[in-house]
Image (tube, rainbow, N blue to C red):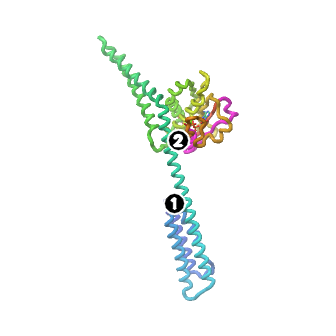
Amino acid sequence: MVRVKGSPLLSVLLVGLTLAIFAVDAFTPLDVAIAVMYVVVVLLSASVWSRRGVLLTSAACLGLTLLAYALSHAAYFSGPASGRMVVSLAAVGITAWLVLHWQAATNALIAREEALHCSQAQLAHVTRVTMLGELAASIAHEVNQPLAAIATNGEASLRWLNRPQPDLDEARAAIGSLLEAAGRASEVIRRIRALARRSDPSHLPLALNDVALEAAGLVRRELASHQVTLKLDLAPGLPLVRGDRVQLQQVLINLLMNAMQAMQRCAPGQAVLVLQTRACERGGVTCSVTDTGPGIPAEHLPKLFDAFFSTKEDGMGMGLPICRSIVETHGGRIWAAGPEEARAGAVLHFSLPAMGGHSA
Ligand SMILES: Nc1ncnc2c1ncn2[C@@H]1O[C@H](COP(=O)(O)OP(=O)(O)OP(=O)(O)O)[C@@H](O)[C@H]1O
Ligand SMILES: [Mg+2]
């Protein structure tokens, strides 16, 4: 059962209000149905207490109505007073019934939303791992490059040291390059591990340009094998955004992969992908991925971000819905340019709010 968040101050106020109604009802000679005011107590109790609390409050209000009647009319029977008491009991009872129904429906809705959020996170993780599988060749290449550099520099430094007159400066320089390559390799591994890990998103200050560069690095091999030219057009001095690095990388990789897949039939040298970042007018940062593929037909635009919408034989139709879910949990929005903007190919934009600071 989902608990309603309680406020101690409101709880105290409710108890005070209940006692005040009881005091006026039991000890003043007013000939009005004061006990009907318990309806307010029952209504407010739903925003402070859970189901059991509402039940107890309603029972207490009913009990106090009867007690006040007994105290004020113990000596004589009054028809109008009894009528008012019955009306009050009915009003409090009906309100309690309605409030409990409303609370149950709200709790069910909250539970469903939580379940949805949880399954979205799981799905995002599964597609990330699938994406890693697709990027396996790129990743192998990314790691292989620094490993080859380590081997070459290691051999070179040995040669410099094994000379009859060892050249220590050259050996030192080769070992320096070797260490640099080792650092690069472990950085690649760290990025891949972060993508594969199933961790809760952590929202930290980020420079979107760095995320763009990392995402571009992860698809580098893919770009080469598809013969796609990537142009980076990253604006300097953009405001920082608050976000999860891995999730935003996932958004960018999805957009880059879609663009590459769309340009599969381009003539050699015609496949050009532009990854652009800009400050947006209302603060924040906009990132755009533009390609020279066939573009997105106008009739597909309204359903582009729907789950399972895909025009590819082997497409799941989950890339863009996941991008939207990630961008929206970052307080941003994602959209595809209409035909008037995207004259040749497709343009996908997403924007994120700035967090106040400025990147270098
Ligand atoms: N750059 C693009 N150019 C043309 N069409 C695109 C582009 N990006 C997306 N689309 C269209 O949007 C559809 C949905 O994309 P989405 O990434 O959600 O799914 P998918 O790529 O088909 O499958 P996957 O779940 O494997 O990513 C694609 O099938 C394609 O028709
Ligand atoms: Mg896709």
User: Where is 41 relative to 127, above or below?
Assistant: below
- Asked whether the viewer can see residue 95, the reply is yes
Alpha-carbon neighbours of circle 1 within 10 Å: few (<14), some, or many (≥20)?
Answer: some
Give the left or right position of residue 47, taking residue 176 as reference. right
Which residues are the magenta region?
A: 319-344
Q: Is residue 337 magenta?
A: yes
User: Where is 334 relative to 43, above or below?
Assistant: above
Q: Residue at x 59, y 32 (%)?
A: 289
Image coords of residue 34 (percent x, y) = 60, 76
- Asked whether the viewer can see residue 279, the reply is no
Give the left or right position of residue 297, taking residue 115 as reference. right
Q: Nearer the viewer, residue 123 or 16?
A: 123
- Report the residue that reaches farthest toward the left: 164
Secondary element at tag 2: strand
- Amino acid carrying mark 2 in the image: Arg
Would you say the residues marked 1 and 2 are in contact, meaning their CB atoms lie under 8 Å apart?
Answer: no
Image coords of residue 193 (percent x, y) = 43, 36
Give the left or right position of residue 129, taking residue 31 as reference. left
Q: Residue at x 52, y 73 (%)?
A: 59
> Marks 1 and 2, Cα distance to the nearest angstrom?
29 Å
Look at mark 2 in the image and give the residue it sits on: 242
- Amino acid carrying mark 1 in the image: Val
Image coords of residue 2 (percent x, y) = 50, 58
- Report the residue that reaches farthest toward the right: 340
Q: Nearer the viewer, mark 1 or mark 2?
A: 1
Q: How many marks?
A: 2
Among the two numbered marks 1 and 2 on one chain, the one whose residue lies closer to the N terminus: 1
Q: Which mark is residue 300?
A: none
Q: Which mark is residue 4?
A: 1
